[in-house]
Image: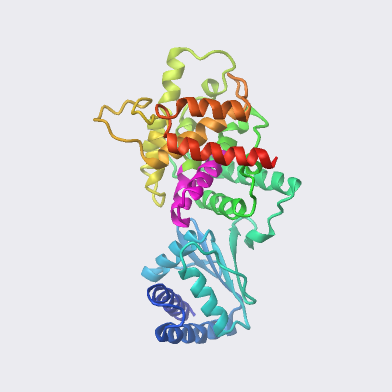
Amino acid sequence: MSGRIQAFITTMMTAISNCTLYSRDHASVDTLVKKAHDLLEEILEENSPLSVMIVDSDLVINKSPLKNPGTHGLNLMKKMKKKGITGIEFMKGINKNEILRFIADISEQGKKPGKYPHIKTGVIDVRLGGLQVGDDIDLDPDGLAAFRKEQVNKVRESFSTFSPFRKLHSSGLEEVVTNFIITFRREANILNLISPVRTYSEYTYTHATNVAVLSMFQAETLGADDNLLHDIGIAALLHDVGKLFISQEILEKKGTLVDEEWDEIRKHTLYGARYLATVDGLPRLAPIVALEHHLRYDGKGYPDLKREKKAQHLVSQIVAISDFFDALRSRRPYKRDWSIRDILVLLREGAGNEFNPDLVENFSRTVVTALKRG
């Protein structure tokens, strides 16, 4: 069985490559699709459906990790992540035309997988062991509230698995990013996807989730592809991870922070970057954003890197705007919450100094449009 599955993955990925290079009507694509269909029929005779999942950094076939996915298996995982999916199911009855349509959709940049009679694509819920199809997400107010709460809980669960001596497992974060990419493409008002902070203890997880949503949404309005959106989402979720190395007594202090306490909080950028640089499988953007999200567009801010003038990474600039917006929007122990319009005024005042003016203009325009929709 495993040999046929490897052959199927190799054949399918080769067909996707040829479809990208030539077209879906090319003779080589037709030959490869026929071979893939024949292999898949043999596999499904013994075990239906055939499930392909990404769990952490593993390619899991029918609930068993593929020990040696090879180049084609690794490329399949990259393709899936670019398309915002972590699971595929192939079912009995599939025909050659369905496989061709699926391969063509996967090969086309910027196109989401369609709907097929015998192929399901979506997001894997590891805890439930099932495939959650993005179109099933309820976009009514109550459904969105439940969806937001579920994503915050997943972030909390992921963060709870790590310590300075134990590595972070990113499978839950991958799910959150994929879920939000799918959902904000269906929900026109981005403000409906950011969560309120109900308790001080929830702030870390809610803020991380909101910053990720706002950052991915900014990036998509700027034309970022799915692969970059994924990396930005993970990096934004982890931008403040260094605060988990700082005592809750300081983070939740209701009175004014003294200078020593502010100095300790500012160190979270260094703590986070150092930690994330040791975690395998994370996007390279993750430690960069953790380090730079409190640097400024004009080169000031913190940490003081003792280096020649070097521009803050564009993704760090995107996350800085999202971080500022959500931090002021949320009520904290040591400050009041601000109205959205007041925050936009402050963002514009900081344009050119604290923030990239072009990004501020793009973000403000997007948020104002959302406010008008109500």
Residue at 45% x, 75% y is 9
- Asked whether 228 falls inside the magenta stretch, the response is yes
Residue 373 in sight here? yes
Residue 169 in sight here? no
- Report x, y in % for residue 30: 46, 85
Colouring style: rainbow
Which quadrant is home to the C terminus?
Answer: top right
The main secondary structure of the magenta stretch is helix
- Report x, y in % for residue 65: 48, 65
- Report x, y in % for residue 261: 46, 17
- Report x, y in % for residue 136: 69, 59
Q: Is residue 251 left or right of residue 193?
A: left
| Vertical comparison of 76 with 294: above or below | below
| Vertical comparison of 262 with 129: above or below | above
Q: Which residues are magenta?
A: 208-235
- In the depicted view, which residue is nearer to us: 188 or 135? 188
Q: Is residue 122 left or right of residue 353?
A: right
| Vertical comparison of 373 with 21: above or below | above
Residue at 35% x, 25% y is 300
**Residue 252 position by quadrant:** top right
- Asked whether 77 falls inside the magenta stretch, the response is no
- In the depicted view, which residue is nearer to us: 162 or 38? 38
Q: Is residue 230 left or right of residue 367?
A: left
- In the depicted view, which residue is nearer to us: 278 or 148? 148
